[in-house]
Amino acid sequence: MATAIASSNMTLVDIAKQTMPDGSIESDVVELLTQDNEILADMTWEEANGGTFHRSSVRTGIPEATFRRFYEGVTPVKTTYAQIDEPMGMMENRSLVDAKMLDMAPNKERVRMNEAIGILEGFNQSFCETLLYGDVGTSPAKFNGLLPRFDVLSAASGENIIDAGGTGTDNASILIVNWSPRTVFGIYPRGSAAGISREDLGRQEVLDTSSPGRRFTAYEEKFQWDCGVAVRDWRHVVRIANIDKSALVAQSGAAALLELLAAAVDKIPSSMGGRPAIYMNRTIKTMLRIQCMKQTNVYLTVGQEESRPKLMFDGIPIRKVDQMQADEARVT
């Protein structure tokens, strides 16, 4: 599969370096986010073209060519399009550090960043879970994730759902996404620094929630991340659904993961480039490795990425995503 030109397929870190060239604290926040979330290292990001949404025009029809003879005319034709609006969600949280503790600390910025790391980990987990399972129909404040777009076999996108045969309630999925500005990408508000901000609110008088009426002084910071995901071409997302976790772990009647992955990869169009990646939870990744130990294969390989071993299938990196559930309902 071809790879898109790097300058047009920017990650969140790439955008942070462009919008915050002075190395401001927001760029440090972006670095911390990507360290704990492998999906962010893969995702392409684009500035939204609306205030709280991104509008894409998707080609829905291509006319057939007309064969003609000499002195015969042809009827003018045109392609057809549909507009899709993708919403963004607004995540916000605040950190408090007791002013007395901070005043006594030799490195105040390190203390505040250590407190911020917990906030950022919460952002990471919330973003990843919403990216996978978000549904504005049930949670209007969030954004639409990827898996709910591929949960009906009879829908148009059902062509990119592979049924692994599980019928219980402890099913899992494998997700393949080909990230690029023309296919699937993250979105952030226009004119913002990748949608991320960290604001120092200074010293504040804070109520002690454990003892009503009591107060203390604290340093407060506000963290915000406005973001979403746009699926411009659903053909570049494939879901292997209904993987029976119990059968897989028991290795009895288990899904043949290598065969399923081969079928899924072949569904991704190869003509548009992009940055493809495969996502699965910890259990599925472990069982994939175990299945491969029992047979000879040339598709699952180990490479290097930033001096770390990287598991790949057919040259596509495999990422472990703990937010991918192992108790999904059956996709029908």
Image (cartoon, rainbow, N blue to C red):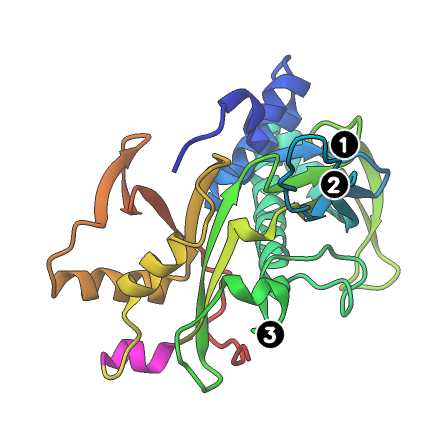
Which of label 3 and label 2 is nearer to you? 3
Contact check, label 3 and label 1, Cβ < 8 Å:
no
* C-alpha gap between disc 3 and disc 1: 47 Å
Residue 115 horizontal/vertical position (percent): 60, 42
Q: Which mark is residue 119?
A: none
Q: Which residue is mark 1?
A: 199
* Kind of residue sitting beneath label 2: Gln
Q: Which residues are magenta?
A: 244-251
**Residue 19 image point, x, y percent:** 68, 20
Going by the image, does 67 lie left or right of 238? right
SS at mark 3? loop
Q: Residues within 10 Å of mark 3 (few under 14, many from 20)?
A: few
Task: Look at label 3 and name its amino acid.
Answer: Ser
* Residue toward you, 264 or 198: 264
Residue closer to the observer: 105 or 18? 18
For the stretch drawn in magenta, what is the main secondary structure? helix
In this orientation, which residue lies closer to the viewer: 242 or 221? 242
Q: Alpha carbon of mark 3 to alpha carbon of mark 2: how far?
A: 38 Å
180 w.r.t. 191: above or below = below
Is residue 307 placed above or below 23 in the rendered structure? below
C-beta proximity under 8 Å, tags 1 and 2: yes
Residue position marked by numbered label 2 in the rendering: 224
Quick one: label 2, few (<14), some, or many (20+) residues within 10 Å? some
> At x 65% / y 38%, what residue is drawn?
68
Q: CA distance from mark 1 to mark 2?
A: 9 Å
Earlier residue among tags 1 and 2: 1
Magenta span includes 246: yes
231 left or right of 301? Answer: right
Look at mark 3 in the image and give the residue it sits on.
154
Q: Is residue 105 visible?
A: no
* Residue at horizontal 47 percent and vertical 37 percent from the top: 271
Quick check: 22 left or right of 83?
left
